[in-house]
Image (spheres, rainbow, N blue to C red):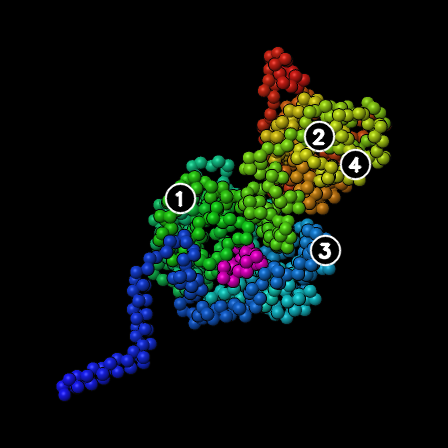
Amino acid sequence: MQARKKYVLLGLCACCWLVLFYCGGGVQLRLLRLLTRHRSDILRPWPNWTDRAFLPRYAHLDELQTDPGSAESPRQRRQAWSTVYRDSRCRMDTCFDFSRCRRRGREGFRVYIYPAEKGDRVSESYRKILTSIAESRYYTPDPREACLFVLGIDTLDRDQLSGQFVPNMDERIRSFPSWNDGRNHLIFNLYSGTWPNYTEDLGFNVGQAILAKASLNTEHFRPGFDVSIPLFSKDHPQKGGERGWLLRNTTPPRRKYLLMFKGKRYLTGIGSDTRNALHHIHNGKDIVSLTTCRHGKDWEKHKDARCDHDNLEYERFDYQELLHNSTFCLVPRGRRLGSFRFLESLQAACIPVLLSNGWELPFSDVIQWNQAVIEGDERLLLQVPSTVRAVPNKRVLQLRQRTQMLWDAYFSSVDKIVLTTLEIIKDRVFSHVSRNRYMWNYLPGGLLVLPEFSTHLAHFPFYYLGLGVSPGHEFTAVIHAVSPLVSQSQPIMKLLQVVSRSKYCSQIIILWNSEKPPPSRSKWPPMPVPLVVTDGRRKTTSRFLPHVAIETEAVLSLDEDTVLLTSEVNFAFLVWRSFPDRIVGYPPRSHFWDPLKHAWGYTSKWTNEYSIVLTGAAFYHRYYNFLFSHYLPQSLRTLVDRTSNCEDILMNFLVSAATHLPPVKVAQRKQYKEVPPPQGTKSAPWANPEHFTQRQECVNTFASWFGYMPLVHSQLRLDPVLFKDQVSVLRKKYKDLERA
């Protein structure tokens, strides 16, 4: 009986256990997961602050950028964003009409600006953007020719509290006949959202338009479609801009201060957590991290216990002095992800240390930012000092040099920012003929390397040294002829004989710009190299056209009255092969600043210093012909053709702007002189009294277009080893040239 009771009791226990297992298993599993999750939270390691790939595992970027006092959750923010950017999955192949751009090949890339409506207010920054487009080689006044459309309405500031906010945008843009839900449209924006969250809401539906936007979040950025641009101030120059502050080969690479920041501190709202913590790394010695809460109308109402002390410390240091003397510059996020500090740091060669989680860096499609900046994590601020201290001097110098290259190439002016944006879009449209990453990230930068010429690095003079290749061993002589051939004793006949005897000469091209037709081939002397006579169409700029007949890398540009020896030609060519990215020649000129006239001057006086080598007798790379014809605006080329003057000065401006280097002068047996023309022939241009005045005006016109003076002075002259030495002529390689 007792045994039966035992079995009954055991059976009841088994039944109860089964009931609990099937009915209460969910509770047990939840408890188990809670316990294991709690344990894993304790044991998991903190990520490396430089590894951005680990960030989403610990906190969503939207959560980090949301003010704790805000009632809007990250999910609500994402939903709000998706309602504004309904075409968030746009790509070039789904939201762009390529047919509008490929009607005339790459020449079909034209940009149209909608005319401004009466009463519209346009900010200074947006006016500069529109001016840059209107003065570019891509602008068209005809919307039927356009590949890309830009709004005439100012869209830069979309903060509803701003005085520059334009209302009723949806209604206005839908009235544009070419809007087509934004397809093939480009919208520029610097400020979006408003207090307190500063979301990326522009306040209107951009549809399928491309966004060129500052402070773009990586989650909202549409790769290969949108373009992230830098945040720049209204005072950013239209053209040119100041040069970077790093001098060549500056040593030691480190400066007085290791790390610096000086800027606003936000007491509440988004972005306040990051800047409120910056005082923790300040030591007042090699790390200066200063913030002030003295900004805004009501700052005293909201100031905290640290405000007064921070404000006093803030006044102790001058911002410009810190910027000039710091190795690294903190660039923390502000209300938005971007900051003015970014461009300021680049210009100052102060390596930016970014504290802005989720920021899509400017022109990230093409620029390799890991070679110029250090990307940090807002949550790991205390690791920043030890991290920058560990960067070796060699790496510091590399980073600083790259900041200067990027600043000069893409960010020093509004013109460069806008043109870089257009070139990136153009490369997407014509992806089969586009720049590679190397072209974008090495001197002279993507704006001066035109893929229409070639997509191979070895075809450009800037990359020979880096690739370890040498230019070719032959040259093509291009002689600019303006006088009719009336005598066999004219200077051009002797010049043909001198040049053709050079063992490096491949062919000679005569660019016929005379009013009379060219003579037949029988009138020209016999020569050991091919001779081609081509019509110059009586345009002065035709001497720099990219003639298809030029097959060599080196071009020897000559005026018809140039007087040279064959040995001088040979020596100059060998010098050019050592400097293939520069103009190498004989007759020098110089520029100077006239403080009385507040203008640039031009001089032909023979001095120890020069900045121009005239192309009447000079070698250069044939790519510069292509750059001259396709990069420079039509207005400058028209000026040259109208005056029949200054084409040589303009070519020197162009080459120095691309290389940041002066031309190279080589030795000459006699000083270069303009020979009076034979009787009965057209007088030389230099004989005109207005010739010199025109050249003075040209220098200032060209400097105005470039936005700065690109010409660089030099005192270098290259001579043969035994030039004018008191030794036997038999020992000299260039006997006629080196004769004492």
Check disc 2 and report the residue beneath it.
506
Front in this rendered view, residue 445 or 661: 445
Counting residues from the start of the chain, the first of labels 2 and 3 encountered is 3
The span picked out in magenta is 212-232
Is 221 inside the magenta-drawn segment? yes
- The answer for how far apart the CA atoms under marks 3 and 4 are is 30 Å
Q: Residues within 10 Å of mark 2 (few under 14, many from 20)?
A: many
Residue 669 vs 70, above or below: the answer is above
State whether residue 710 appears in this view: no
- Amino acid type assigned to the residue bearing label 1 in the image: Val
Q: Position of residue 354 (x, y in %)?
A: 44, 52
Is 295 inside the magenta-drawn segment? no
Counting residues from the start of the chain, the first of labels 4 and 2 encountered is 2
Counting residues from the start of the chain, the first of labels 4 and 1 encountered is 1
Check disc 3 and report the residue beneath it.
103
Counting residues from the start of the chain, the first of labels 3 and 4 encountered is 3
Instruction: Using residue 371 as the reference point, say whether residue 675 is left or right of it.
Output: right
Q: Residues within 10 Å of mark 4 (few under 14, many from 20)?
A: some
- CB within 8 Å, label 4 to label 2: no
Residue 655 vs 100, above or below: the answer is above
- Amino acid type assigned to the residue bearing label 2 in the image: Ser
Front in this rendered view, residue 394 or 281: 394
Q: Helix, strand or loop at disc 4?
A: strand
Which residue: 43% across, 42% down?
396
Q: Position of residue 633 (x, y in %)?
A: 69, 46
Task: Using the rendered view, name the quadrant where residue 575 is placed.
Answer: top right
Check disc 4 and report the residue beneath it.
534
- CB within 8 Å, label 4 to label 1: no
Disc number placed over residue 391 in the picture, else none: 1
Overall secondary structure of the magenta section: loop
Residue 615 vs 289, above or below: the answer is above
